[in-house]
Image (spheres, rainbow, N blue to C red):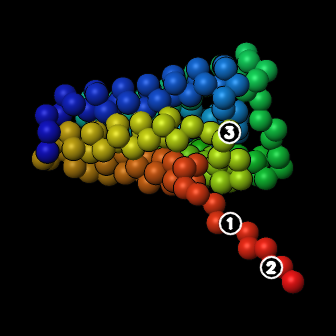
């Protein structure tokens, strides 16, 4: 366990990663899937509001805020720079619809921990288009941007103090470590080579 003030540092890592991703998008090095990034902005910001309602520690909750605010920057760049465009498919829109449905269910329940769980589910469905894209077109993504979320989330978890370890404080950081690690692995791991049989 580390001093809980380190949670602020934990929040800065993913924000820095998003800023780096936005710069890369502006330069045409990456092409963000807007379905993922719109909902990656929306879901964490809703989770952040829910965490505040549940009286989660503000310093710990800054991670959730930063992983919502950062994608807003990426989105702004994706609409400004023509080089940052990625074609949206019906599959992307389907995943986005499921993601939005999870947010609607949260609005109906109105309960803090359920809101956090539904926002995680929403974020997960929003991630699916980028998960697929990271596997099929890894050069259109940046592993570093996602690894900063892993580092920041790990720091945030370590900064949770005794007595504060509850669903509202640990759920989103643990989820972020998982999903960002998977996306990063899909980007950097080598693909299996196709075997060509010769007569």
Q: Is residue 183 above or below residue 85?
A: below
1 or 3: mark nearer the eye: 1
2 or 3: mark nearer the eye: 2
Q: Is residue 175 above or below residue 75?
A: below
Q: Secondary structure at mark 2?
A: loop
Q: Are marks 1 and 3 in contact (CB under 8 Å)?
A: no
Quarter assignment of residue 28: top right
Query: Who comes first in sequence, dot 1 or dot 3?
Result: 3
Residue shown at 21% from the left, 44% from the top: 158
Residue shown at 28% from the left, 28% from the top: 9
Quarter assignment of residue 81: top right
Q: CA distance from mark 2 to mark 1?
A: 12 Å
> At which x and y percent is residue 170?
31, 48
Q: Which residue is mark 1?
A: 193
Q: Secondary structure at mark 1?
A: loop
Q: Which residue is mark 3?
A: 140
Q: Residues within 10 Å of mark 2 (few under 14, many from 20)?
A: few
Label for residue 197? 2
Quarter of the picture containing the N terminus is top left
> At which x and y percent is residue 72?
58, 24
Residue shown at 19% from the left, 28% from the top: 5
Q: Are marks 2 and 3 in contact (CB under 8 Å)?
A: no
Q: CA distance from mark 1 to mark 3?
A: 20 Å
Relative side of 124 to 60, left or right: right
């Amino acid at each position: 366990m580390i001093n809980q003030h380190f949670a602020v540092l934990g929040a800065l890592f993913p924000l820095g990663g998003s800023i780096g991703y936005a710069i890369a998008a502006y330069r045409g090095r990456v092409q963000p899937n807007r379905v993922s990034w719109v909902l990656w902005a929306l879901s964490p910001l809703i989770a952040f509001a829910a965490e505040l309602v549940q009286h989660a520690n503000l310093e710990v909750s800054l991670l959730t805020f930063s992983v919502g605010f950062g994608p807003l920057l990426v989105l702004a760049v994706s609409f400004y720079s023509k080089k940052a465009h990625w074609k949206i498919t019906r599959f992307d829109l389907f995943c986005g619809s499921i993601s939005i449905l999870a947010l609607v269910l949260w609005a109906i329940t109105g309960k803090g921990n359920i809101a956090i769980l539904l926002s995680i589910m929403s974020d997960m469905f929003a991630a699916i288009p980028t998960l697929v894209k990271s596997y099929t077109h890894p050069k259109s993504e940046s592993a570093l941007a996602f690894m900063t979320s892993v580092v920041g989330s790990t720091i945030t978890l370590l900064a949770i103090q005794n007595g504060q370890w509850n669903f509202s404080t640990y759920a989103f950081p643990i989820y972020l470590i998982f999903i960002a690690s998977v996306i990063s692995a899909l980007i950097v791991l080598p693909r299996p080579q196709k075997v060509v049989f010769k007569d």
